[in-house]
Amino acid sequence: NDAQNNYDGKGALVGATWATTLITSPLFGMIPAFIGAYSDPAVENMNIPDQKEFDTNSEYRKCYTEEAQHIKQKKALKAFAMSTSIWAILSIVITSLAM
């Protein structure tokens, strides 16, 4: 529950996914999305409310880290899905204008 309240999943991952997908294609956009989604969140980005508890209680650390990872995965995959949708729409519009 602490991770849901404190970890926002912000970082370069979402921006990198959007930029790579829109500038190149979803094929390349999935690279930062999946690499980032399945890498552990950095401790300094987790906004841990009770650092002492995190450092001393292995169960708390495990649960907090797993929930932060889950949040990070959802954000990365959502960014990939949304940027892919926009890329597809832009591709259709540009193609239809070129005809």
Image (spheres, rainbow, N blue to C red):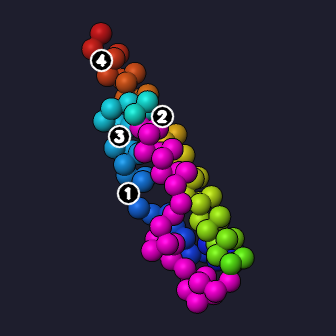
Disc 3 designates what residue? 20
Span of residues in magenta: 29-57
The CA distance from mark 1 to mark 4 is 33 Å
Q: Distance between the residues labelled 3 and 1?
A: 12 Å
Examine the residues drawn in magenta and state their main secondary structure: helix
Mark number for residue 85?
A: 2
Quick check: 53 left or right of 45? right
Q: Do the residues labelled 1 and 2 touch (CB within 8 Å)?
A: no
Q: Farthest right residue?
A: 59
> Residue 28, position in %: x, y?
40, 34
State the image coordinates of residue 96 (x, y, percent, origin top left).
35, 16
- Residue located 31% across and 22% down the image: 94
Q: How far apart are marks 1 and 2 (CA)?
A: 20 Å
Give, as a three-letter code, the residue at label 2.
Answer: Ser
Q: Tell me: 7 left or right of 62.
A: left
Q: Distance between the residues labelled 4 and 2?
A: 18 Å
Say what secondary structure mark 3 lies in. helix
Residue linked to disc 1: 12
Q: Nearer the viewer, mark 4 or mark 2?
A: 2
- Asked if residue 99 lies left or right of residue 18, the reply is left
Q: Is residue 35 above or below residue 96?
A: below
Quadrant where the image shows the C terminus: top left
The amino acid type, in three-letter code, at marker 3 is Thr
Q: Which residue occupies the extreme left position in the image?
A: 98
**Mark nearer the viewer, 3 or 2:** 3
Whether residue 88 is visible to the viewer of this picture, yes or no, is yes
Within the magenta stretch, is there residue 41?
A: yes
Q: Distance between the residues labelled 3 and 2?
A: 13 Å
Q: Earlier in the sequence, mark 4 or mark 2?
A: 2
Residue 97 - label = 4
The quadrant of the image that shows the N terminus is bottom right
